[in-house]
Amino acid sequence: MGDVINLSRYRKAKARAEKEQKAEANRVRHGRTRTEKQAVQVELERQTAELDGKRLDSADDGKQSP
């Protein structure tokens, strides 16, 4: 005769395992490595600095000093 198993525990364990597999797949699909995050951050900082360098001064908006 086979071992007696609790079906409720079996279902819960199976559900946990499936949930963990799905979570792992999502981490692989949506996760980014540290170097990827740093590269994006450096690029954003570069773009911000470039835009700030092209900004016109707001004090020179057509007003002349007397």
Image: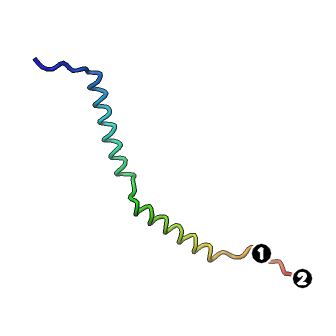
Side of 14 where 64 appears, left or right? right
Q: Residue at x 44, y 66 (%)?
A: 39
Q: How is the image coloured?
A: rainbow
Residue 47 picture quarter: bottom right
Instruction: Look at the numbered disc 1 and give the secondary structure of its residue.
Output: helix
Give the amino acid at mark 1.
Ala
Q: Between residues 57 and 16, which one lies in front from this camera angle?
A: 16
Residue found at the very far right of the displayed protein: 66
Mark closer to the chain start, 2 or 1: 1
The quadrant in which the C terminus is found is bottom right
> SS for tag 2?
loop
When asked about the image quadrant of residue 58, the answer is bottom right
* Residue 33, position as x, y percentages in the image: 38, 58
Q: Residue furthest left?
A: 1
State left or right for residue 66 relative to residue 49: right
Q: Position of residue 9 (x, y in %)?
A: 28, 24
The picture places residue 26, in percent across and down from the top left corner, at 36, 47
**Residue linked to disc 1:** 59
Asked if 42 appears above or below 7 in the picture, the reply is below
For marks 2 and 1, give the CA distance: 14 Å
Residue found at x 33% / y 46%: 25
Is the residue marked by circle 2 packed among few (<14), some (14-19), or many (20+) residues within 10 Å? few
Using the image, tell me which numbered label, if any, was put on residue 66. Answer: 2
